[in-house]
Amino acid sequence: MNRVFDSSGPEGKVRGTPQQIIDKYNQLARDAQLSNDRVATETFQQHAEHYMRMLSEATREMEVRREEQERQNRERQIERDREREERLARQEQQAASQPKPVEQAEVSADPSDAPQPDVMETGAESGLVETPETQPKPKQRQRRKPRTKPVEQSTDQAPATTDAQAPVSEAPDAAE
């Protein structure tokens, strides 16, 4: 239909698509009829009729191709639909034959039925979940005061020894 033809008619070459050539020959036939040339009118009409037949044949062939293509598309779609149904049926059979894991059953169920996290009450009953940041820090051990050597006292007073001023032994304590 969109193919360009060269037509060698009685008036010379006519170039164009079949529809353009038909229009040109019809115009030439009208001009010949107005000039009372019946032979030229008939010749141009015959050329126009030839290209009309070519155009109608090309249109018919395109219609047949289009219908064939539509039929093939429908068949492909039916085949795809059938394969999809078979695949879904196989998946359903496999799912039915295999026991469902507990975790998967819980996930597919209503989320409100799923196990909920533990809520720990903090002193003020805030209702918040306890996190490591909110836990009280463990008490640190108090540092011992370093041991010092006893201060020597004057001889005038009697030496009074206390636990803090007890003489330091060179052996390490077993408790440490």
Image (cartoon, rainbow, N blue to C red):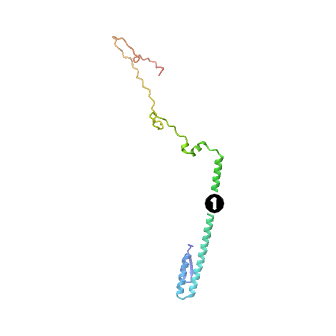
User: Vertical placement of 61 versus 158: above or below?
Assistant: below
Q: Nearer the viewer, residue 80 or 36?
A: 80
Task: Please tell me which residue is depicted at 65% across the width and 52% down the height of the picture.
Answer: 89
Task: Please tell me which residue is depicted at 61% across the width and 72% down the height of the picture.
Answer: 60
Most extreme residue toward the bottom, as rendered? 36
Q: Quadrant of residue 41?
A: bottom right
Q: Quadrant of residue 83?
A: bottom right
Task: Please tell me which residue is depicted at 54% across the width and 43% down the height of the picture.
Answer: 112
Please state the horizontal and vertical placement of residue 173, each as a whole percent of the image: 46, 19
In this figure, what is the number of numbered marks? 1
Q: Quadrant of the N terminus?
A: bottom right
User: Which residue bears the numbered disc 1?
Assistant: 78
Please state the horizontal and vertical placement of residue 97, each as a whole percent of the image: 66, 47
Q: Quadrant of residue 106?
A: top right
Q: Nearer the viewer, residue 37 or 135?
A: 135
Q: Judging from the image, what secondary structure is the residue with disc 1 in? A: helix
Q: Nearer the viewer, residue 20 or 63?
A: 63
- Left or right, 35 with reference to 97: left
How crowded pointer 1 is (Cα within 10 Å; few <14, some 14-19, many 20+) is rated as few
Q: Amino acid at mark 1?
A: Ile
Task: Please tell me which residue is depicted at 57% across the width and 87% down the height of the picture.
Answer: 38
User: Vertical placement of 27 versus 159: above or below?
Assistant: below
User: Vertical placement of 100 versus 132: above or below?
Assistant: below
Please state the horizontal and vertical placement of residue 30, each as a whole percent of the image: 53, 84
